[in-house]
Amino acid sequence: MRLLLIEDDPMIGRALHAALVASGFAVDWVQDGRAGELALGNGGYDLVLLDLGLPLKDGMLLLRQLRARGDAVPVLVISARDTVGDRVLGLDSGADDYLLKPFELDELIARVRALVRRSAGVAAPVFACAGITLDPALRHATVDGRALALTAHEFSLLEALLRRPGAVISRRRLEDSLYAWGDEVASNTVEVHLHHLRRKLGAERIVNVRGVGYRLAGP
């Protein structure tokens, strides 16, 4: 999954970026509201972590403009603005959740996972389809009850497919779920990871819809 972190404090930003990457997310980090606006204009994010006290453009204004144009990407506000009025304003302006600084990284990451599940229409914390299960919190996956040994990229690809079982996911969208800005990506990287994933799952479980993308087979 690919996240956008909009946070101007270098110390907080570095800690968040490192923790999220260690949890298996691809993360783009920008440090002012204008840069956040430009990044959001490109789309493709599964979730946005948004500070409010940003230089160049206030985070609350950025949030309102995002919702005004109909962008439904989940937004988790992370802010030191701690009054009840601030929290109500943030939620009423379109935030999906509001977390006060300082916070525990484990709690933030759990909230991120919960928001991503909700946006995918999944209530359970474990994804399941066609004999495959995947637990993002425990970083554990099985096929037909057998534990899978997956690389970080294989796990992310499988999660992207399981979040929308049966739907065809484009190669570009799968690539976006693996890599943040600045990552070096070979032209056939996604296909290579999918090839290895198929060997572990069984080739018939991932269907290549030629010219469109990939989907999981089965109910």
Image (spheres, rainbow, N blue to C red):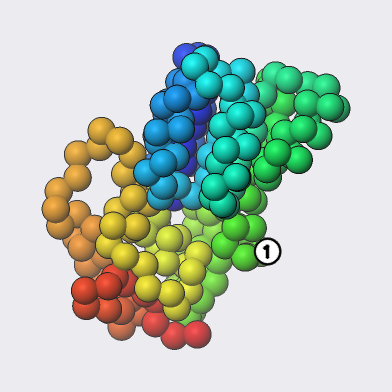
- Count of numbered circles on the image: 1
Q: Amino acid at mark 1?
A: Ala
As rendered, which of 93 and 29 lies closer to the eye? Answer: 93
Q: Is residue 186 left or right of residue 111?
A: left
As rendered, which of 121 and 72 lies closer to the eye? Answer: 72
As rendered, which of 31 and 65 lies closer to the eye? Answer: 65
Res. 218 image quadrant: bottom left
Res. 76 image quadrant: top right
Q: Is residue 136 above or below residue 78?
A: below
Q: Residue at x 28, y 57 (%)?
A: 172
Observer able to see residue 170: yes
Secondary structure of the residue carrying numbered label 1: loop
Res. 207 image quadrant: bottom left
Graded by Cα atoms within 10 Å as few (under 14), some (14 to 19) or many (20 or more), the crowding at tag 1 reads few
As rendered, which of 116 and 60 lies closer to the eye? Answer: 60
Q: Is residue 154 above or below residue 56?
A: below
User: Can you give x and y, in whole percent of width and height, for residue 200 in the image?
Assistant: 31, 70
Observer able to see residue 106: no
User: Can you give x and y, in whole percent of width and height, for residue 202 in the image?
Assistant: 31, 78
Q: Residue at x 49, y 57 (%)?
A: 140
Q: Residue at x 67, y 36 (%)?
A: 107
User: Can you give x and y, in whole percent of width and height, for residue 73 in the image?
Assistant: 54, 49
User: Can you give x and y, in whole percent of width and height, for residue 157 in the image?
Assistant: 36, 59
Residue situated furthest right in the rendering:
84
Q: Residue at x 64, y 29 (%)?
A: 60
Q: Is residue 197 above or below residue 96?
A: below
User: Residue at label 1?
Assistant: 123
